[in-house]
Amino acid sequence: MLMRRLLLGIFFMGVFCSAYPGYAEVTGSLDLINRAKEHDGKLVTCQGEVIGDIMPRADHVWLHVNDGYIAVSVWAEKELVQEIKYSGDYRATGDTVEVSGIFHRSCLEHGGDLDIHAQRIILLRSGVVLKNPLTSKKAQIGLLATSAVALFYLLKMFLQSRPHLKPPG
């Protein structure tokens, strides 16, 4: 009787676990690019910083995930990206996410581009706004450089308007 219950329990655990998609181990962008043919049409998982704009398209969005080497395009339903608050640019470090989905080395739906059709996106770490204040030294250098350029431009214009003052040659 105990053996029967044990086997029945193992059977139901197998059925329960198979109801959820098995997500792959994390694949880097270089591996996706270099072995694109092998990954094509398969479930992949990648991690990285969300960079650039998140571009809405009806009930989906485009986003780009950069693992430090290459940014991979991700096509996702809007609901999957609701937790994402920061995209990386010169003002902020983007949220770090884990994306799992079907990899396409040449997606027919999206003009033949390489992309991942996300099935799951998990926020791993929130991004932050970068603090890069304008210091007085930076302002002085900028003002000095702008003044020098303006002075040379005015001098050139003055010399061009006075042909008799032009140096020979």
Image (cartoon, helix red, strand yellow):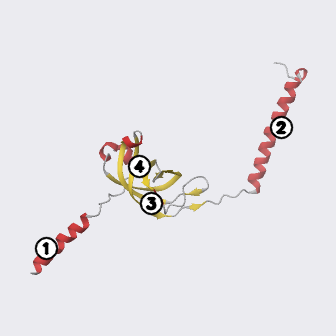
- Give the Cα separation between the discs numbered 2 and 1: 88 Å
Q: Position of residue 129 (x, y in %)?
A: 60, 61
Mark 3 — residue? 79
Point 46% across, 63% down: residue: 123
Residue at the (74%, 52%) spot, across then down: 138
| Mark 1 residue element | helix
Say whether marks 4 and 1 touch (CB < 8 Å): no
User: What amino acid does circle 1 point to?
Assistant: Leu
Q: Amino acid at mark 3?
A: Glu
> Is residue 5 found left or right of 119 in the rendered image?
left
Q: Neighbour class for label 2 at 10 Å: few (<14), some, many (≥20)?
A: few
Q: Earlier in the sequence, mark 2 or mark 1?
A: 1
* Image location (x, y in percent) of residue 60: 45, 53
Q: Disc 4 designates what residue?
A: 29
Q: Which residue is mark 2?
A: 151
Considering the numbered disc 4 on the image, is that residue within a helix, a strand or a loop?
helix
Who comes first in sequence, dot 4 or dot 3? 4
Residue at figure coordinates x 36%, y 45% from the top left: 104
Mark 3 to mark 2: distance in Å? 55 Å
Give the mark nearer the N terminus: 4 vs 2.
Answer: 4
Categorize mark 1 by other alpha carbons within 10 Å: few (<14), some (14-19), many (20+).
few
